[in-house]
Amino acid sequence: MHNRLTANICIEASPATQNQAGLGRYTLNLIKNLSLCDSEFNYSLSYNDRTNAIIPTELTQIKHYSSGLTNNWWRLLNALTYTNKNLLSSYYKGVDIFHSTGHLLPKLDNVRTVFTLHDLIPLLYPSYHKPLNRIFLSVMMPLFLQTADAIISVSNNTKDDAIKYTNTDPSKIVVIPEAVSPSFHNITDEQHLTYVRNKYKLPERFVLCVSTIEPRKNHTTLLSAFERLHKDHPNLVLALAGRLGWLYEPILTQIENSSARHNVRLLGQVPDKDLPALLSAATIFAFPSVYEGFGLPPLEAMACSTPVVCSNTSSIPEVVGEAALMCDPFVVESWHTQLNKLLLDKSLQEKHSQIGLTHSKKFSWSSVAMATSQLYKTLLR
């Protein structure tokens, strides 16, 4: 049995140091909460692209393994470890467990490995990825899953996908759902809400969607539904928060040509400090994504007491439970109906605001950290 008191756990932190939306948030919250909940391990971080890396303040005191290689070269080096596992083994000398959080796992000698599987989008929806990403992950993802000593799946749906599409051994997979950061809570201070509305040029009533602008997030359906809503709610605004991802040109063109274009706001990537107030100020949070490995934004909206309308596909129903109104992501009429129903019914808004808030409290980062720590202990036995 390994002496757990001296065990060194290295967590890949590139998603956090490169501010990679959902993956970055997962990584940062996991590391922060692991160090709070468990003093039995020595934690360290691994990341690449050292020159451009932005180390979150909370992680500056932890030991770092950093590489100057940019993403493509770092990916190539990690892939080459599958032909020669000594390539990076000396780099991680002294590490007992290496935990990959960003869909990249080197093959290492004498190091136990944990792989967080966020989704299988490159395999299931290849058209939603850039060609280089698609080719790399379609080849390497099955190898990562086969090589890892343990796999954390963020949802039962993603676990089922891994078993079905990559023939992964089910006994290696542990489901540990993501969680909502405590910073997401209902902001009721009117001055704060007015400040955020003014900053982003938003009216009293608006529908908010927070996600990267890319095909899988399916803004097309939401915009089409909003065009119908706009006829009956001419002052309503659709606010799209999120950075431009890839293959986003069609949605920008659709906005430019839309009959409701003057009521659509592209907010860009909203800083974390503004998100809770923006979510709290929104009348409805809409999430029309085609596929999610987990789907954290609806939960964050619920934590801010905002009613949610979301897709009924992949892991999303598992995550939102009975607390959201759900639609087929491709049926515009269904989105129009559900959004309109909420806009017209204040008591229904209040009902979903309350049950959403209660539901979001079931997902805590301390629980994620404790379950992850327990997995480390199991691997070291």
Image (cartoon, rainbow, N blue to C red):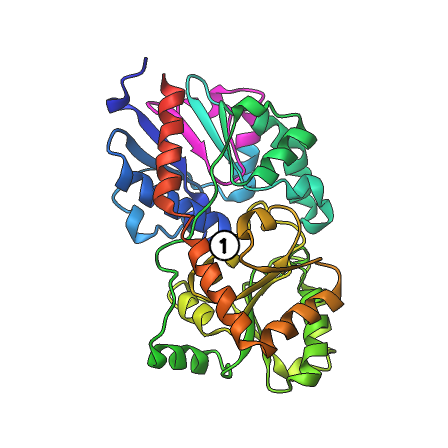
Using the image as rendered, state which of residue 28 and residue 369 is in the foreground. 369
> Could you tell me which residue is drawn at 48 percent across and 60 percent down?
356
The picture places residue 143, in percent across and down from the top left corner, at 61, 26
Label 1 amino acid? Ala
Residue 207 in the image: x percent, y percent? 57, 73
What is the span of residues highlighted in magenta in the rendered image? 78-107
Residue assigned mark 1: 21
Q: Residue furthest top?
A: 1
Instruction: Classify residue 112 as left or right of residue 235.
Output: left
Figure quadrant of the C terminus: top left
- The image quarter in which residue 263 lies: bottom right
Residue name at image x 34 percent, y 52 percent: 56
Q: Nearer the viewer, residue 376 or 255?
A: 376
Locate the N terminus and report the quarter of the image it occupies: top left
Residue 167 painted magenta: no
Q: Reply above or below: 268 against 229.
A: above
Task: Classify residue 104 as left or right of residue 222.
Answer: left
- Where is residue 348, by image quadrant? bottom right
Q: Is residue 269 visible?
A: no
Number of marks in picture = 1
The crowding category of the residue bearing disc 1, from other C-alpha atoms within 10 Å (few below 14, some 14 to 19, many at least 20), is: some
Which residue is found at the position 38% from the left and 67% from the top? Answer: 186
Q: Is 107 or 212 nearer to us in this picture?
A: 212
Q: Is residue 241 above or below residue 165?
A: below
